[in-house]
Image (cartoon, grey):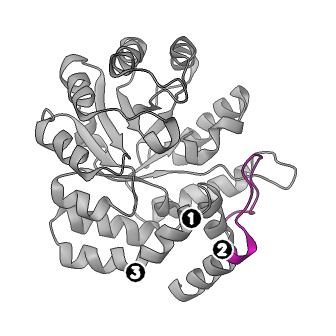
Amino acid sequence: MSLRSQLSSTGVAIITPFKQNLEVDYDALGKLIDFIIDGGINFIVTLGTTGETPVLDKQEKLDIVHYTFEKVNNRVPIVVGIGGNNTQAVIKDIEQYPLDKAAAVLSASPYYSKPSQEGIFQHYKALAKVSPKPILIYNVPGRTGRNVSAATTIRLANEVENIGGIKEASDDMNQCMQILRDRPDHFLVVSGDDALVMPQLACGMDGVISVAANCFPKDFAAMIQYGLKEDFAAARKIHYKLLEAYDLLFVENNPAGVKGFLYELGIIQNILRLPVVPLSNSVQEKVKAFVKKYS
């Protein structure tokens, strides 16, 4: 079964809640998982960068994956994030992580190192060779410092069997359209930009891996469904309803924004691990006002 048939529509890159003592708050994580599944989302991404993976140790990551599989209990597919800029270390993680219940592995392109397009191609080819699950490319040049070009994405899609799709978060609509025009039929293309996904659906994207859907799963999932059915009049109503929230989610930092919203919704404590800090008081007040108006 292709990733396109499994993972179209609304995915959520879930956060990692923490307690006051900075330990992982599994009660809050379970509450969040139920909240988004009950809201109608289609799949979950655990250990994405929204989950603060740079500040989780290896055992915490393994424990979160095991807990997520157990809590979700086959209600929706799960994608596991495994990335880094040391190809051999990522290969070792793919070989060691519990992936038997996963639908795919989401792997961000190597950050900081700024490899050439050939280096990016060879990196993903090496991961795909060892992965027991399809690899989902994650292109987010605003965080990694290097864009995965449309040509490299299409080359990977056509030449490497175990590359199943891409989460495209380049903010470049022309690049998105090139990928959509040239992709093979089986290749999944989902957005990584909450504020752009509605028009991207009109261009042919299959869905989204969303941050905002942590907070607004029901509306966001409905918007994606409307867009996939080409009912853009209905999709636009929800898009503009959430437009201010998109800005607030990312104005200072992700996941500081989404945690600020989830705190106001009563789902988590507003705790992050350094170097990320909670939203400034002025922005948090705007988040509080939006949640009050929204509800």
The residue at which mark 2 appears reads as 283
Question: Which residue is at the front of the view, 68 or 260?
Answer: 260
Locate residue 159, reporting x and y percent: 20, 17
Looking at numbered disc 3 in the image, what kind of residue is underneath it? Answer: Lys
Question: Which residue is at the front of the view, 128 or 145?
Answer: 145
- 105 vs 185, left or right, is right
Q: Quadrant of residue 265?
A: bottom right
Q: Residue furthest bottom?
A: 293
Viewer-nearest of discs 1 and 3? 1
The residue at which mark 1 appears reads as 251
| Residue span colored magenta | 267-284
Q: From the viewer's perspective, is residue 137 above or below residue 21?
A: above
Q: From the viewer's perspective, is residue 234 above or below residue 29?
A: below
Q: Residues within 10 Å of mark 3 (few under 14, many from 20)?
A: few
Give the mark nearer the N terminus: 2 vs 1: 1
Q: CA distance from mark 1 to mark 3?
A: 18 Å
Looking at numbered disc 1 in the image, what kind of residue is underneath it? Answer: Val
For the residues bearing labels 3 and 2, Cβ distance under 8 angstroms = no
Going 40% across and 80% down the picture, which residue do you hit? 241
Image label count: 3
Looking at numbered disc 2 in the image, what kind of residue is underneath it? Answer: Val
- 186 vs 117, left or right, is left
Prevailing secondary structure of the magenta residues: loop
Locate residue 111, reporting x and y percent: 52, 30
